[in-house]
Image (cartoon, rainbow, N blue to C red):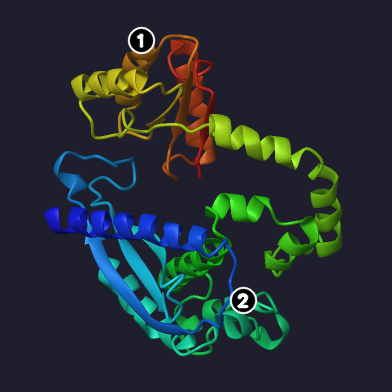
Amino acid sequence: MLNALLRFFYFSRNLTRHHRLEEKNGGHATTTMKITAVTTHDVRFPTSADLSGSDAVHKDPDYSCVYVVVSTDDPSCPEGYGLTFTLGRGNEIVASCVKALSFLLVGKDFDQDIVKDMMNVDDHKGFYYQICQEGQLRWLGPEKGVVALAAGAIMNAVWDIMARRAGKPLWEFVCDMEPEELIQYIDFKHIDDFVTKEEALKLLRSIRPGWQERKQQMKDQGFRAYTTSCGWLGYSLDVVRAKCRESLAEGHQYFKMKVGSRDIQDDMKRAAVIREEIGDDLFLMMDANQKWYVGYYCASSTVCFVSGLLVPSAYFIFALL
């Protein structure tokens, strides 16, 4: 636990240092950059000890991640960081998969081999498809499971480098892209029967006006977020109540709880405590984590509606199936 915390402290400290280098460089890529190494860190937290993170399906998780560091030979942007999330056991498998994919990065020119034509689906030439559809490793996926988790961590690190070279946080880097540029980074392989690239570009152009005002609003006010800190399924009612009060003190207005207990009365009791603590004006959401099938959901929501505890007092219910 301590070692993991020390690692995160180290990475956070380096992140700040690297942003200073970017600002000093004017936020622009000025040199050729090659990738020199891909390093993985197996980071785990024993959250199963107090059932933090527990839900109806994942009852005793140890929240963990594979932390990926992509190193370069460019002193103005020496590293990019990415991670992928697991629940403990198997974290080492994802780390091994990252290592197995790293040959696609090490020694490559970042601009020419990684970023340029990243989404070129023709014969999977683009880097995105090279890593998601690698000819041998895709047999273990593709685009799902361990391969998807590993590829996601690597892609996160790649995007991190792109944003760092621009001297911006990732959200702002994406926000500043014009529709014609942003559209080039979207994978239409599985969605073009629903929305084509041309239709998506038209949509992005239609909502582009006012983007600078929205960007400033993000900087001034931030983005709405919910907390699940009071809602984990394994928490006792006393812990639920204490966590609600902590979250309220931090200014939270949106709360999510896990449902899907073997006995629905347990869900109702926790919901009653949360609603009692947060009042009627704040928002309560529910997540069944694939525990409820359609028939059970209909029956459960009827019971909850009659009780007046979960529905209609819930803002919405999701992850039902």
Residue 235 as seen in the image, left or right of residue 150: left
Q: Residue at x 54, y 55 (%)?
A: 170
Q: Is residue 287 visible?
A: yes
Q: Position of residue 216 (x, y in %)?
A: 64, 36
Mark closer to the chain start, 1 or 2:
2
Q: Residues within 10 Å of mark 2 (few under 14, many from 20)?
A: some
Give 225 or 29, whichever is nearer the viewer: 29
Callout 1 amino acid = Glu
Q: Residues within 10 Å of mark 1 (few under 14, many from 20)?
A: few
Badge 1 marks a residue whose secondary structure is helix
Residue 276 disc label: 1
The quadrant in which residue 54 appears is top left
Q: Which residue is mark 2?
A: 115
- Residue 152 vertical position relative to residue 245 in the rendered view, above or below: below
Q: Is residue 90 visible?
A: no
Badge 2 marks a residue whose secondary structure is helix
The quadrant in which residue 41 appears is bottom left
The quadrant in which residue 87 appears is bottom left
Callout 2 amino acid = Val
Residue 312 as seen in the image, left or right of residue 38: right
Q: Position of residue 77 (x, y in %)?
A: 46, 70
Give 72 or 104, whichever is nearer the viewer: 72
Residue 22 disc label: none
Residue 81 as seen in the image, left or right of residue 95: right
Q: Position of residue 50 (x, y in %)?
A: 16, 39
